[in-house]
Amino acid sequence: MRYLVLLLILPLVFAQACIEDTDCSDETGCYNGTCEPLCMDDSDCESATCDNYVCVPETNLTIDTEINLTSNTTLNNSNTSNITNNFSETRELENNFSITVNNIQTEIEMLTSNTEGLEARLDTIESKLTTMDSKLSSIDNEAELQALQTKVEEALSNIAALRTNVETTQTDIESVQVGLETTADTTSLTRILSIIAIIITLSLGISLYIFHHNGREEELDPEIVNYITGHIKQGNNYDKIKEHLLKAGWTKDQIDEAYKKVKTHNYHKYLKDNGRGHEVPSKAINHKKPVIIASASFLIIMIIIMFMGSTTGQAVYYTLDSSSTVSDYILAAYEGSGFTEMVSIYDVCIQFPTYTGEQVSKRFIRTETSYGVYDAATHCWERDTDSFSVMFESQEDFETMMEAIATGSPSTMASVANILNIIVLPSDYVAPGFYARKDYTKFCTSAYQFHSWISSNLGITYEELFPDCIE
Amino acid sequence: MTFIREKKINGKQYAYLVKTVYTKRGPRQKVAKYLGKIHEMQCQKVEGHTPKKVMESLLANLGFTKNRVWTKKEYSVSLVTGKVCYKNKKCVLKINHGYLWGSSIKQFLLPTRDPKELAENMLRVGIPFNEETYFHLVKNIEHLGG
């Protein structure tokens, strides 16, 4: 029995006495003067209570018994049986308590494992709730809702406006279609009228020309006529006459021309003197006028070639509205007529008086890589270094010509050009005297496309108009 | 074989102890235990001649102070029970690609006589490996009679 008591007392005797944690070993902490095991939670302690990382000893039955036993300093025989009975009861209670504790511990372990799972789920739920809260707060924001509503209303009104625009556009398209049909009809009518006008103009021109020149003799210098006639009568041949005149300062061309004219003059005189005046031609042939016509046509054709290129035969109708600028007219003419690689570098100066009377000069410049319309630094009539240079008598003429070029039809272009008042200004290819300062043979391939039109409309062959194009 | 697997849930990392099980469809991973939320920390160097000293050096370098248990703000680590908590909830400290939690702490503190196992335990718990420390620990093993 003594041993039993000692066994119960031993833990109390050997319990470490302490004041601070440092008085205890690493695995224990000081609690109420006693070193107790360290813990993180109740599950680490046998007593199931962990306080401030130390297991707190509970006042249990065993300790009570121990205290009772130790307090009884005197033991007698009469009490022994009671003690024994008490002890056996205590043992029984202790066993029951141990079982209960074990059960509780098992339950705690189960609960702990369940709690761990629940913790994880709680974390997940918590984070989801946070996300939902943030979303809800953003949605619940009344101001935002109002702003959203305003935006929706705005979008709806925009859609309504768009619908109206679509309807308007449809109406516009319909009117444009009607306009196009009308324009097509008008264009056809315009073309017919243009052709009639050209025919009338040409007829009038020819009539006036014939009337103006009818019966006029060519005026020759009497000095040279007498000189050449005298020498012919003396029996001198042409070479000798020519030699004398060259020494006198006449040029070879002048001498040739004068000789021919003297011969014609004398022949006509001979016919008249011999009563054969009816055989004299009714009018003299003026060689200068065809040259002028041919040169002007040459210029027009060249401009057409450059603007039109290889789209000959393709009918492209353009309707330019009144708001279009001058540059737009020129670019539309160029782009509408097509583009050719045959003529890659050139510049054209175009001058005309606007409706208000102000002179405008524009340069259309094309390089190998680009093209464009620019304001000329000086008026076209003040310069002669462009490839070609023309002046229209009015803005209306300019616009008519550009529209004609934009049609892509060479006959239309030429017809319109003939009825318009286009003044040819000095330039590289049409220098004063209608000769080209520069070699125009690079245009020959393009120009040849007009050969049949040239012969039928200008009364001159392609070869005569472009002599340098003949190989 | 068990190992730790991280799962990202709503942007937060959680650690699970998973084990490999063999099924008819081949090997599959099965979660054996939830270990807690992962908190990352960095430590460059440790000192010490024994596993316990090395562990204490690790915690000290991480900013923990030794009271009854090792604490740092709301973190607490007990080398006795091997529990690692944040706000009284168990968690895992991820240090240098290793994981500091109950099992890894206990495993590292247990005496071992195998240098290879010692090195593995060091890496598993996240102790930065350096030659000097490892040398002393191996010497300690030899002292133990390994």
Image (spheres, coloured by chain):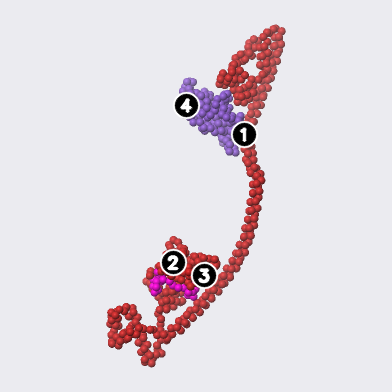
The mark that comes first in sequence, 3 or 1, is 1
Indicate the amino acid at tag 2. Answer: Thr
Element type at mark 1: helix
Q: Is residue A301 visible?
A: no
**What colour has chain A?**
red
Mark 4 Cα within 10 Å, few/some/many (few <14, many 20+)?
some
User: Circle 1 marks a residue in which chain?
Assistant: A
- Front residue of A57/A346: it is A346
Q: How many marks?
A: 4
Viewer-nearest of labels 1 and 2? 2
In the picture of the structure, the residue carrying the numbered disc 4 is: B133
Q: Find chain B in the image and tell me its colour.
A: purple
Horizontally, is B110 left or right of A260 in the view?
Answer: right
Q: CA distance from mark 1 to mark 2?
A: 88 Å
Identity of the amino acid at label 4?
Thr
Q: Which mark is residue A378?
A: 2
The residue at 34%/85% (across/down) is A222
Question: Dot 3: what SS?
Answer: loop
Quadrant into which the C terminus of chain A falls: bottom left
Residue A12 is inside the magenta segment: no
**Amino acid residing under circle 1:** Ala
Q: Residue at x 49, y 70 (%)?
A: A353
Q: Earlier in the sequence, mark 1 or mark 2?
A: 1
Q: Which residue is mark 3?
A: A356
Spot occupied by residue A407 in the image (x, y as percentages of width and height): 51, 69
Q: Position of residue A310 (x, y in %)?
A: 46, 67
In terms of secondary structure, where does tag 2 sit? Answer: loop
Magenta stretch in the rendered image:
A408-436
Discs 3, 1: same chain: yes
Whether labels 1 and 2 share one chain: yes
